[in-house]
Image: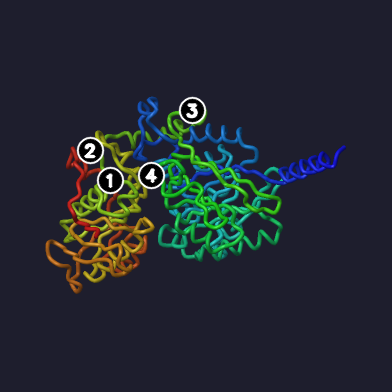
Amino acid sequence: MSVRLLTSVAALALSAGTAMADYSLTILHTNDFHARFEPISAYDSGCSAEDNTEGKCFGGSARLVTAVEEARARAGNSILVDGGDQFQGTLFYTYYKGKLAAEMMNKLGYDAMTVGNHEFDDGPEVLRGFMDAVDFPVLMSNADVSAEPLLADTLMKSTTIEVGGEMIGLIGLTPQDTDELASPGDNITFSDPSEAVQGEVDKLTAEGVNKIIVLSHSGYKVDQTVAANTTGVDVIVGGHSNTYLSNSAENAEGPYPTMVGETAIVSAYAYGKFLGELNVTFDDEGKLLSAEGEPLIMDGNVAEDDATVARIAEAAVPLDEIRNKVVAEAAEEIVGARDVCRAMECGMGNLIADAMLERVADQGIEIAIANSGGIRASIDAGEVTMGEVLTVLPFQNTLSTFQVTGATFVEALENGVSQMEEGAGRFPQVAGVTFTVDPSAEAGSRISDVMVGGAPIDPEKVYGVVSNNYVRNGGDGYAMFKDAMNAYDFGPDLADVTAEYIAANAPYTPYTDGRITVK
């Protein structure tokens, strides 16, 4: 054999050995599912059976079952993970709490998920029940749960799973301000995400794990910060900000994946409308060699799994009487889109604020303020069912009335607009008051021209305000309302108040009137 041939054979052997050392993994992922077990419309709300038959609907657990099965079939090694917020969003959660989510996630065969802020909406008790029911680990690294007996020995910061003979490290992450966003109770303290992640990375690395994935319910911007501030994280599967990443869609907020240093960040919007599919390859040292993919849209071209359709229909029976009741009519679409209502005055925000204010106007209340994070969907034109209203307002919040000074209310508005850049849910929708916000100004000095009843707000005067019990008790950063005067948090359900207002003004025509001016 010639020297040249021997050299070629050796090179081939070497390249074959190198190829065999590489490890490929398909990461299938969802986030912010929010109990959308049934298909959704283009407005992320309910979708009729007729429209679903015509291929106009998206998502639903039955499509996910098919899509996950097909993705696993074309992949070699694969995992299915979730970026948090399975809880809250439809009557299914209101009725079943976490039980149906656990059943569907077990059916889909998830390998892990992180805790989203909405997993704490009904306190540690419901989260613990969900964790007991699922067949996979639920993770949260940036919190101390040692003082919460329901979670202390159960909720792990990180874990490892074996896939194709390789150990994969998984770390959970939840919003640092979950104590403001949900109801975790007084026994849990939340901490800086970057420090928490790095601590778990170091622990896993010391155990010999060199492939690490963070399941992060912290938002796209925080994910980028974590990626920049840590070493050893290969992939971040995001959630919380409902960010749609894509390499082809015009409305994408960034590329899929978004690379920060050597870390690949992915997110698949929300509500089961997409199944994220990221294909990664590592070398023998655990270095990420490649990361590519695209969220797969769960549209009418994805067949629904018959058994899952039947199970969801069975689970829906107790809900049908409530949600199919037609309560009003909309003359046109009432816009409640997240990217609109968390940045400016929106039609749904005006509707809700107007409804709140009218309900209690005879009690000396002058101003209404609602957090846009409580607005979860739009409503299309035509008949409005109670189910649609409950999809928009699923949290069972009650009207709260109270009194604060004008200075305190301006402080509340400053809080509301303080995180506009992040699309935070604290952005205020209002009635009875107008104001101007300058997003380019420093947070804390963005509000001007506040008018109540046509007159400039008086910092010393006491005003009657209506909001929801979540905001009044300090949710979404509105801590200045906690010590409000003459607070009463037990008014009627906000969804009922809104439904009655639409009915009284049917056919309801949504509008904006310049009550919020964004410079």
CA distance separating discs 3 and 4: 25 Å
Residue bearing mark 4: 251
**Looking at the rendered structure, which numbered label has been put on residue 332?**
2
Q: Are marks 2 and 3 in contact (CB under 8 Å)?
A: no
Q: Hey, what amino acid is under mark 1?
A: Asp
Does residue 60 appear in the picture of this structure? yes
**Foreground label between 2 and 4:** 4
Q: Are marks 3 and 4 in contact (CB under 8 Å)?
A: no
Does residue 128 appear in the picture of this structure? no
Q: Quadrant of the N terminus?
A: top right
Q: Hey, what amino acid is under mark 2?
A: Glu
Q: Are marks 2 and 4 in contact (CB under 8 Å)?
A: no
Residue bearing mark 3: 303
CA distance separating discs 2 and 3: 31 Å
Q: Residue 357 falls in which quadrant of the image? A: bottom left
**Looking at the rendered structure, which numbered label has been put on residue 484?**
none
| Number of residues whose C-alpha sits closer than 10 Å to that of mark 4, classed few (under 14), some (14–19) or many (20 or more) | few
Label 3 vs 1, first from the N-terminus: 3
**Foreground label between 2 and 1:** 2
| Number of residues whose C-alpha sits closer than 10 Å to that of mark 1, classed few (under 14), some (14–19) or many (20 or more) | some
In the displayed structure, 57 sits above or below 93; it is: above
Q: Secondary structure at mark 3?
A: loop
**Looking at the rendered structure, which numbered label has been put on residue 496?**
1
Q: Secondary structure at mark 2?
A: loop
Label 2 vs 4, first from the N-terminus: 4
Q: Position of residue 249 (x, y in %)?
A: 42, 41
Label 2 vs 3, first from the N-terminus: 3
